[in-house]
Image: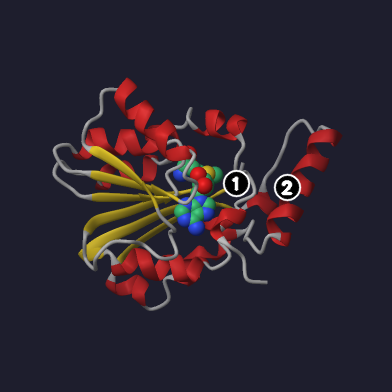
């Protein structure tokens, strides 16, 4: 089935946006912290409400961070959060990670957290991330391996909700086990471009 990017399953959920806005680079993206240097130009694909994007921006200042998200509703939220947190070296725009509106070799690092598992064509997104990367740049992705999630103690209602979430992702043509398989998306490109993929279970 050909899926549109707007088919993201939490599309339009204000509760989801608020929950995602509590995320931080230190907690969700610590693996990328040692790679960030002042002056770098960074792209955050599928930035959502942008709280992680802002943490990246602080670390690369005076470099610039661009956050893109397909959901136009998230952009004003992200812009407002940037104002509230006093971060000026960040801008946001609506874009599809599978067709990035940037020239080749624009960014030093392309970051993405919790996006690729929602994409119908993650390989296309991976190729786009590589295209906009400067030679020697790094693509740094974190994606869940949901089937490996463990909940303790077990709560039957929540187990059922988890199972429904996985089924919904699969029906939407997405990849709940993206973290497990994402190293393969780089293919031979992975050797020529710094590629960092972190799989996580919750
Ligand atoms: C689970 S949220 C993660 C947001 C943020 N990266 C974070 O971790 O807090 C996934 C985000 O990807 C966005 N998204 C889904 N499909 C997309 C696409 N094709 N291109 C760009 N963004 C997309 C959604 O709108 C959503 O904001």
| Residue at 42%, 54% in the rendered image | 141
Residue 70, above or below 158: below
Residue labelled with disc 2: 165
Query: Residue 112's x, y, as percent?
Result: 41, 51
* Mark identifier at residue 152: none
Circles 2, 1 touching at the beta carbon (< 8 Å):
no
Using the rendered view, name the quadrant where residue 175 is placed: bottom right
Query: Residue 130's x, y, as percent?
Result: 33, 67
* Mark identifier at residue 201: 1
Please state which of residues 4 and 125 is positioned toward the viewer in this rendering: 4
Q: Is residue 40 visible?
A: yes
Instruction: Judge left or right: residue 3 versus residue 167.
Output: left
- Disc 1 element: loop
Instruction: Judge left or right: residue 63 versus residue 130.
Output: left
| Residue at 35%, 75% in the rendered image | 189
For this orientation, the residue located farthest to the top is 84
Please state which of residues 183 and 105 is positioned toward the viewer in this rendering: 105
| Residue at 28%, 41% in the rendered image | 91
State the separation of the CA atoms marked 2 and 1.
Answer: 15 Å
Instruction: Judge left or right: residue 163 versus residue 62.
Output: right
| Residue at 26%, 23% in the rendered image | 86
The quadrant the C terminus occupies is: top right
Residue 196, above or below 74: below
């Amino acid at each position: 089935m050909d899926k549109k990017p707007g088919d993201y399953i939490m599309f339009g959920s204000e509760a989801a946006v608020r929950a995602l806005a509590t995320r931080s680079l230190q907690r969700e993206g610590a693996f990328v912290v040692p790679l960030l240097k002042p002056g770098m130009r960074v792209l955050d694909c599928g930035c959502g409400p942008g709280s992680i994007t802002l943490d990246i921006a602080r670390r690369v200042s005076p470099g610039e961070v661009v956050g893109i998200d397909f959901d136009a509703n998230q952009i004003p939220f992200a812009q407002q959060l940037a104002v509230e947190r006093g971060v000026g070296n960040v801008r946001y725009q609506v874009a599809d990670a599978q067709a990035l509106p940037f020239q080749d070799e624009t960014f030093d690092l392309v970051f993405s957290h919790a996006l690729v598992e929602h994409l119908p064509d993650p390989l296309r997104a991976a190729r786009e991330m590589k295209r906009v990367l400067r030679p020697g740049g790094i693509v740094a992705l974190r994606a869940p391996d949901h089937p490996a999630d463990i909940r303790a103690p077990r709560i039957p209602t929540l187990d059922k909700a988890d199972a429904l979430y996985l089924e919904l992702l699969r029906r939407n043509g997405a990849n709940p086990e993206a973290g497990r398989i994402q190293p393969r998306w780089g293919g031979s490109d992975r050797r020529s471009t710094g590629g960092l993929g972190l799989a996580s279970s919750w």
